[in-house]
């Protein structure tokens, strides 16, 4: 008998409700993926405002769930289990999703699993490309996280190999966009401008690539500062800022460091496949360079479509399905949101 799993996501500025079907053979099928974003309410602040995000989740949760059930042609009573993001994320934002999930689970009398958002970013790939080749390497790149993970079993065994010591990759995009007068979130407009620019025009630094630096950690704040200084110097001289070249050169530095370290980690740990996920995985240069370098190193590359890479409820439903399939116990009824949940804790 197949099972219907509902996934609820509210860790940042996206209210997501996803529905998937877990088939008897362990494959997971996407049925609905509804997202309500409060990104426009944060745009004028240049970053997510936690209080605003929490209130937006509260307003959007029930309507988003209703849309998901309508899209899937299902009723609430068809749900067999619920998964919700327990962390990491913004405390108040997470609490809205956890409270909603507890209410649905109590009303439906179905098991509830508090799960890790980062593991969800990895699990989502199974909705597009089928079962994960485990073990594999995962590169998570979003506005909030930048991590290299060794994934032995997505439902229960994930190890962090490295992470950013300062800004996340997406955060660097957002901050650089602000410096050069492009809108928030900065990833899409920088990606677009970079298509017209020369990636070799300006030699921006490659963070944490020195011989004494931690091999699998990242740093983007020096790069962001270098871009800001370069732009300021041009403005001081009265030169027009070559926005396309700045974007292309900045983007080249980010894509170069991310893919070089990811391929090095996969090679060192003998991992034959790599999954790249998170909002920055939508970046055209990152995926092109990753494809090139993975092919050269004999690594299978999997990048879910952009819609699945950004925060959504389907990724939490997908992870929930793998957790249910693995026979893991549901969370205790009194579990809470854990803003700093480590990636090694897949279920709370
Ligand atoms: O995964 P996501 O939707 O939310 C978080 O969990 O943070 O990622 C959002 C981030 C933003 O920083 C945005 O600027 C970045 O992903 N982003 C991109 C692109 N599209 C979105 N960065 C680079 N290139 C893109 N095409
Ligand atoms: Zn995320």
Image (cartoon, rainbow, N blue to C red):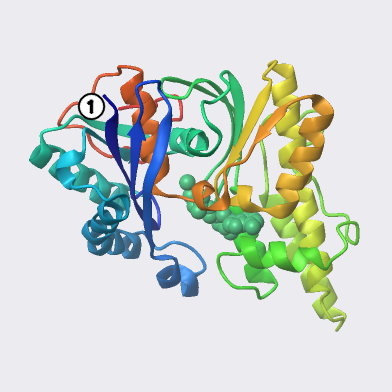
| Residue appearing at x 28%, y 58% in the figure | 67
Q: Position of residue 110 (x, y in %)?
A: 15, 32
Label 1 neighbourhood size at 10 Å, few (<14), some (14-19), many (20+)? some
Does residue 17 appear left or right of residue 126 in this picture?
left
Q: Is residue 5 above or below residue 246?
A: above
Q: Position of residue 10 (x, y in %)?
A: 34, 50
Q: Quadrant of the N terminus?
A: top left
The answer to whether residue 31 shows anywhere in this view is yes
Q: Residue at x 23, y 60 (%)?
A: 58
Q: In the image shown, does 279 or 233 lie closer to the viewer?
A: 279
Quadrant for residue 296, please give it: top right
Q: Position of residue 164 (x, y in %)?
A: 61, 40
Q: Residue furthest bottom?
A: 238
Name the residue that disc number 1 marks. Answer: 331
Q: Residue at x 70, y 61 (%)?
A: 191
* Quarter residue 219 falls in: top right
Direction from residue 198 to residue 341 in the image, left or right: left
Task: Name the residue nearer the viewer: 185 or 33.
Answer: 33
Which quarter of the rendered picture does the C terminus lie within?
Answer: top left
Residue 83: in sight, yes or no? Answer: no
Q: Under 8 Å from ligand 2: the CB of mark 1?
A: no
Q: In the visual, does 114 lie left or right of 228?
A: left
Is residue 95 positioned above or below 245 on the image? above
Q: Is residue 173 above or below residue 77?
A: below
The furthest residue to the right: 201
Secondary structure of the residue carrying tag 1 is loop
Asked if residue 73 lies left or right of residue 159, the reply is left
Q: Residue at x 79, y 36 (%)?
A: 209
């Amino acid at each position: 008998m197949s099972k219907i799993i509902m996934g609820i996501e509210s860790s940042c500025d996206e209210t997501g409700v996803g529905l998937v079907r877990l088939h008897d053979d362990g494959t997971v099928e996407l049925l609905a993926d509804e997202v309500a974003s409060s990104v426009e309410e944060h745009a004028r602040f240049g970053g997510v405002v936690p209080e605003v995000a929490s209130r937006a989740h509260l307003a959007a949760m029930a309507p988003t769930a209703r849309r998901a059930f309508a899209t899937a042609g299902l009723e609430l009573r068809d749900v067999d289990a619920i998964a919700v993001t327990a962390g990491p994320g913004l405390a108040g934002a997470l609490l809205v999703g956890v409270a909603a999930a507890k209410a649905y689970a109590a009303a439906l009398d179905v098991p509830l699993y508090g799960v890790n958002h980062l593991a969800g970013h990895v699990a989502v790939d199974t909705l597009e490309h089928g079962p994960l080749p485990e073990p594999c390497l995962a590169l998570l790149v979003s506005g909030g996280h930048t991590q290299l993970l060794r994934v032995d079993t997505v439902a229960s065994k994930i190890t962090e190999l490295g992470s950013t010591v300062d800004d996340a990759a997406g955060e660097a995009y957002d901050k650089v966009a602000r410096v050069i007068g492009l809108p928030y979130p900065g990833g899409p407009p920088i990606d677009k401008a970079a298509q017209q620019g020369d990636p070799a025009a300006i030699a921006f630094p490659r963070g944490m690539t020195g011989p004494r630096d931690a091999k699998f950690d990242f740093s983007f704040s020096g790069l962001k500062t270098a871009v800001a200084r370069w732009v300021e110097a041009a403005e001081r001289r009265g030169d027009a800022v070559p926005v396309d070249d700045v974007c292309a050169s900045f983007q080249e530095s980010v894509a170069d460091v991310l893919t070089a370290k990811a391929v090095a980690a996969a090679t060192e740990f003998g991992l034959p496949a790599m999954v790249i996920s998170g909002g920055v995985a939508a970046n055209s240069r990152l995926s092109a360079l990753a494809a090139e370098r993975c092919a050269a190193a004999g690594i299978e590359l999997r990048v879910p479509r952009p819609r699945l890479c950004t925060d959504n409820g389907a990724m939490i439903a997908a992870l929930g399905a793998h957790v249910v399939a693995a026979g893991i116990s549901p969370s205790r009824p009194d579990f809470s949101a854990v803003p700093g949940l480590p990636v090694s804790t897949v279920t709370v």
